[in-house]
Image (spheres, helix red, strand yellow):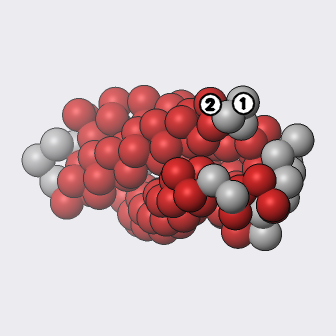
Amino acid sequence: MTTTAQHESNPQLQQHLQECIRNCLECAALCEHCSADCIRLDMQGMAECIATCRDCADVCLLDARLMSRDSPWHFKSCALCAEMCDACASICEGMAGKHSASHSGDIMQRCAEACRKCAQSCKAMTLMRAT
């Protein structure tokens, strides 16, 4: 596993680590916002979006915490985070398409975009493990 000393001696990894933490925190915030908005819509078919956004937010926050404390487990949490974010993005994109003319559709689309960005960042982080 990569250690703190290895992170500090690799400026590229340290820079990407900080960017990935920011992306995870932004994604978590937008997922929470999206799930809250979906709850307020009180429409059938929203349960999957709500549950996935909440799960995604939790995984993103855990990943950000592990990266922040430089846990050797953060590479594995990044892999899970990327998978969760991809799933959440797909669901939110689908729901945004159904609600495209509404404020909620915009929130769902922004959530999907944050999830895609976070997933990309986490996938890149997992690849840096080998370096």
Foreground: 15 or 60? 15
For the question of whether residue 91 can be seen, the reply is no
Rendered location of residue 90, percent (x, y): 42, 30
Left or right relative to 3: residue 89: left
Check whether the beta carbons of the residues at disc 2 and disc 1 lie within 8 A of each other.
Answer: yes
Residue lying at 29% horizontally and 53% vertically, measured from the top left: 110
Residue lying at 23% horizontally and 34% vertically, measured from the top left: 97
Residue that mark 1 sits on: 130
Residue lying at 78% horizontally and 39% vertically, measured from the top left: 76
Left or right relative to 131: residue 95: left
Residue that mark 2 sits on: 127
The circle on residue 113 is none
**Secondary element type, mark 1:** loop
Q: Is residue 77 above or below residue 129?
A: below
Closer to the observer: label 2 or label 1? Answer: 1
Foreground: 7 or 77? 7
Q: Residues within 10 Å of mark 1 (few under 14, many from 20)?
A: few
Question: Looking at the image, which residue sits at the far left?
Answer: 101
Rendered location of residue 125, percent (x, y): 60, 41
Q: Quadrant of the C terminus?
A: top right
Residue lying at 56% horizontally and 34% vertically, measured from the top left: 123
- Give the distance between the C-alpha atoms of the residues marked 2 and 1, in whole angstroms: 6 Å
Rendered location of residue 129, percent (x, y): 71, 36
Q: Quadrant of the N terminus?
A: top right
Which amino acid does the dot numbered 1 rest on? Ala
Rendered location of residue 18, percent (x, y): 54, 64
Q: Is residue 85 above or below residue 66?
A: above
How many numbered discs, if any? 2
Which amino acid does the dot numbered 2 rest on? Leu
Q: Based on the displayed image, in which of its 4 quarters is residue 128 positioned?
A: top right
Q: Is residue 120 above or below residue 38?
A: above
